[in-house]
């Protein structure tokens, strides 16, 4: 009976920009099979349209009374509106009469284990409560957690005998580019920090063909693995008797309607293309990866370790093995050789995560920098206890681009909404590459002829005036011309470290003069570790010391600014 019983239908809806929500949705779909649910996964075509429909006042209060639901949000607690969308969705479903299976889950990118820190216990609770609501009949048991993995797609392959180089084949995504995507050409890729500075930051200028964008907008692109990373991955496979020549052509077909083959994988694809453009060779493996390796290995020692990593009790060990040293999937496959030697072509698509697109705040003005998009990129290279240096996938891909290289990109709205009224002061706090969206807005006002030191106040922070004060000449020139009030914090140019929050306090009178008009907008962008909270506290002190507000009223003042989008934050870890 257990082989034929099918439980209730479970639909997993997800909204995903970076791919993290899709990863979790797929995990829930996979695990639903253990409990015999007829699970399907779906990404609403237009999340905004779906949300707009749910908010219709004409919907009866019992519209969803037959629906059981559970909401898991993915967010970043450094943001003021942490998991705001998930919280509103959870509340709205309840208002329409739906029954909540378990309390809302709030994944936090700031957690040591990332989103898994909240999602793991939430998913465990989901299955417990789902089975209480829809119990299995007598004689039917949940399937084993470590049941053999069923590949999502059928994969066939053949060796391409054509003499042309695989590397000259068309991009994997070329034929499936959306109408929003377009090609840009690299104009300049210039390092804007000194050669002796520890951090390599690039100002990359991209040539467009007249595409328009607004202040606050974001450019999105798909990076590729570095040639050295591809060579290392292919070497490890070959050394473990997984012989897949780069010229091998893959063809994927649907195994189940639950998991259609995405458009960019529907045609013949070379293994070289998959290694360069699809498989994320720098990704940090998750629990599911070790569940698959446990099934592949013929070593009891490897199997025991992999299974330990899949348990709740083994998460600290998994963190210390993978997350803390940033050990990537390629290195894991080298460590677990008895599993690696049994990898098949279809299992590759289960073991390796796809490369996700990356977002960059646009650092140029569409009108001032005509037919160009500029981005500021901090090249990620750092050491852990592992011998080999850790390399950020996208930043190193971009750093390697040369003048004349082409990249496919698309545009989307960012989180910042800049004021339309040129008389509204903008107080911008942008340490490091956080300054990017502000460079966009500053030059927009310059182009419109409305830039002034009264309505553009920029707090910029870096380590040293001489080493990493990028775009220095531009900002100082604008200040000399009275079009910008530039306030810099150089944290390492003196014995005591000075940060942007200290400069806000030093310039409290001027800051309050702008805030007192009730028309000022505050924008904060940069690293999410401590800076956003410290900056907000600095603004609160300004309200107390210069505005004469007590601490409670100062908090209420800033909270009201946040509510009306006059205090906006965009941070990253």
Image (cartoon, grey):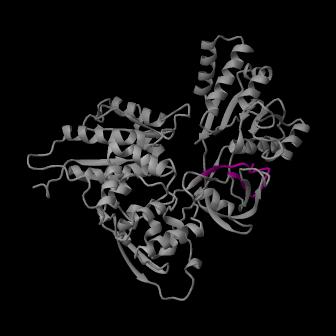
Position of residue 254 in the picture relative to residue 207 (left or right):
left
Position of residue 300 in the picture relative to residue 400 (left or right):
left
Question: Is residue 271 or residue 543 the one in the foreground?
Answer: 271
Which quarter of the image is occupied by the C terminus? top right
**Which residue is the extreme one toward the right?**
480
Which residue: 29% across, 36% down? 64
The reply to whether residue 58 is in sight is no
Which quarter of the image is occupied by the N terminus? bottom left
Instruction: Give the answer, above or below, for where 572 lies relative to 297.
Output: above
Relative image position of residue 523 (x, y in whole percent): 68, 34
Relative image position of residue 392 (x, y in whole percent): 59, 55
Q: Quadrant of residue 389?
A: bottom right
Which residue: 32% across, 50% down? 308
Which residue: 34% across, 39% down? 121
Question: Is residue 115 or residue 215 the one in the foreground?
Answer: 115
Position of residue 475 in the picture relative to residue 243 (left or right):
right
**Magenta-colored stretch includes residue 373:** yes
Relative image position of residue 233 (x, y in whole percent): 50, 68
**Magenta-colored stretch includes residue 176:** no
Q: Quadrant of residue 566?
A: top right
Q: Quadrant of residue 184?
A: bottom right
Which residue: 24% across, 39% down? 128
Relative image position of residue 304 (x, y in whole percent): 30, 55
Q: From which residue to which does the magenta span run?
A: 359-377
Position of residue 397 in the picture relative to residue 301 (left or right):
right
């Amino acid at each position: 009976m257990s082989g034929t019983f099918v439980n209730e239908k479970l639909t997993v809806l997800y909204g995903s920009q970076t791919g993290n929500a899709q990863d979790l949705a797929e995990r829930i779909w996979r695990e639903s099979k253990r409990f015999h649910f007829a699970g399907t996964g779906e990404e609403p075509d237009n999340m905004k349209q779906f949300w707009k429909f749910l908010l219709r006042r004409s919907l009866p209060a019992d519209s969803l009374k037959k629906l059981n639901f559970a909401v898991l949000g993915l967010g970043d607690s450094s943001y003021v509106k942490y998991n705001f969308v998930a919280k509103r969705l959870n509340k709205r479903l309840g208002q329409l009469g739906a029954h909540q299976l378990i309390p809302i889950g709030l994944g936090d990118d700031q957690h040591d284990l990332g989103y898994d820190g909240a999602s793991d216990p939430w998913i465990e609770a989901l299955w417990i409560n789902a089975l209480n609501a829809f119990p299995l009949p007598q004689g039917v048991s949940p399937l084993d957690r470590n049941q053999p993995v069923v590949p999502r797609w059928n994969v066939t392959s053949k060796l391409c005998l054509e003499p042309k180089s695989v590397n000259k084949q068309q991009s994997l995504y070329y034929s499936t580019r959306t109408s929003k995507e377009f090609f840009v050409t690299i104009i300049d890729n210039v390092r804007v920090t000194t050669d002796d500075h520890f951090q390599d930051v690039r100002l990359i200028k991209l040539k467009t063909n007249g595409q328009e964008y607004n202040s606050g907008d974001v450019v999105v692109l798909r990076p590729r693995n570095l040639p050295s990373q591809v060579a290392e991955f292919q070497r490890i496979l070959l050394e473990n008797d997984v012989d897949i020549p780069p010229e091998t052509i893959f063809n994927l077909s649907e195994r189940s309607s639950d998991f259609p083959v995405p458009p960019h994988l529907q045609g013949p694809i070379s293994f070289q293309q998959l290694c360069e453009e699809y498989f994320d060779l720098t990704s940090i493996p998750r629990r599911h990866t070790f569940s698959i390796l446990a099934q592949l290995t013929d070593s009891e020692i490897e199997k025991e370790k992999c299974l330990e990593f899949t348990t709740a009790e083994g998460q600290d060990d998994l963190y210390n093995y993978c997350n803390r040293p940033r050990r990537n999937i390629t290195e894991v496959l080298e460590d677990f050789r008895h599993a690696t030697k049994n990898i098949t072509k279809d299992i590759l698509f289960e073991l390796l995560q796809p490369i996700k697109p990356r977002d960059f705040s646009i650092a140029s003005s569409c009108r001032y920098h005509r037919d160009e998009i500029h981005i500021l990129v901090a090249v990620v290279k750092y050491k852990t206890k592992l011998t080999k240096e850790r390399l950020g996938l996208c930043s190193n891909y971009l750093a390697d681009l040369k003048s004349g290289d082409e990249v496919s990109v698309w545009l989307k709205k960012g989180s910042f909404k800049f004021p339309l009224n040129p008389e509204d002061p903008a107080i911008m706090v942008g340490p490091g590459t956080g300054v990017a969206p502000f460079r966009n807005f500053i030059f927009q006002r310059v182009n419109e002829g409305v830039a002034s030191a009264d309505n553009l106040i920029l707090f910029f922070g870096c380590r040293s005036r001489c080493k990493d004060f990028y775009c220095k000449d531009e900002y100082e020139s604008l200040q000399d011309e009275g079009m910008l009030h530039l306030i810099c914090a150089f944290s390492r140019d003196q014995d005591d470290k000075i940060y942007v929050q200290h400069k806000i306090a030093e310039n409290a009178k001027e800051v309050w003069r702008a805030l007192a008009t009730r028309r000022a907008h505050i924008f904060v962008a940069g690293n999410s570790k401590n800076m956003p909270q410290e900056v907000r506290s600095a603004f609160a002190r300004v309200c107390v010391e210069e505005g004469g507000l007590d601490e409670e009223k100062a908090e209420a003042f800033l909270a009201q600014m946040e509510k009306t989008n006059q205090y906006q934050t965009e941070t990253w870890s």
